[in-house]
Image (spheres, rainbow, N blue to C red):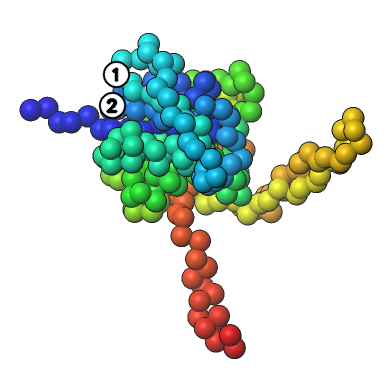
Amino acid sequence: MPDRKPLILVTNDDGITSAGIRTLVELMQQLGTVVVVAPNSPQSGMGHAITISSPLRLYPSDLFTDATDVIAYECSGTPADCVKLAKHHVLKDQAPDLVVSGINHGSNTSISVLYSGTMSAAIEGALEGIPAIGFSLNDFTRQADFSHTHEHILTIARQVLERGLPKGTALNVNFPARAAEPIQGIKICRQANAKWQEEFDERRDPHGRRYFWLAGEFVNFDTHAEDTDEYAIAQNYTSVVPCQYDLTAYGLLDELAGWNM
């Protein structure tokens, strides 16, 4: 008998109608059987939020009827909700061989990984012991061109399917925006030391009540380091950063043990 095709769960945070998820579905069909469970509306910046104060809605979607053998659902919840529902309800506790999230409109390098719904969906897969990858493109426009990412997406996904990943880890993959020159290659990187320097734009509504828009700028403290995801993207490389959900600062454990608690 022929080997079973890998079962691949596809999700995202830009919503099931985004161009990025359609690209990812088409690519994953080359590697296995695809099931889509994605938010029914944009969920960018949701991080690892889950829905606990309202019911979750899950409906079959016909957005991928032109794609052979793709089962798709849209969910009212967050990206993390989508992965949970996919594993425990849609797939009836059958673990996928791979979870892929994206392709996100906008990069998720450096500190953005903490806020990213795209990467939180991948981390949720890792929490379930499933190899997982988050894919993001450094282009926020609705007309973003993903065509230059195809080869690297297939290469990275094939490697993960063949080799697996350590339990509790996921890959954060970021692509530079399409440029005149092809992507230079793939760099294995660390997360850059950077942050968002936030500002809040205070305004008034027609009734005189205050409201705020979050604004600010991205500040990179690793401008001279050549081993970071920010550097790789700036040099027109695809960056790959292995991530884990264990946030324990192990180096501080012994010191804290000596405190007078």
Q: Quadrant of residue 201?
A: top right
Which of the two residues, 152 or 260, is positioned nearer the viewer here? 260
Q: Quadrant of residue 11?
A: top left
Q: CA distance from mark 1 to mark 2?
A: 7 Å
Per the image, the residue denoted by label 2 is 33
Q: Residue at x 33, y 33 (%)?
A: 90
Disc 2 is placed on an element classified as: strand
Residue 103 at x, y = what percent?
50, 30
Labelled pair 1, 2 in contact (Cβ < 8 Å): yes
> Is residue 186 visible to the viewer in this orientation of the structure?
no
Which mark, residue 26? Answer: none
Q: Residue at x 58, y 41 (%)?
A: 46
* On-image quarter of the N terminus: top left
> Is residue 178 visible to the viewer in this orientation of the structure?
yes
Which of the two residues, 256 or 89, is positioned nearer the viewer here? 89
Q: Amino acid at mark 2?
A: Thr
Which of the two residues, 51 or 185, is positioned nearer the viewer here? 51
Q: Residue at x 87, y 33 (%)?
A: 205
Residue count near mark 2 (Cα–Cα under 10 Å), binned few <14, some 14–19, many ≥20: many
- Count of number-bearing discs: 2
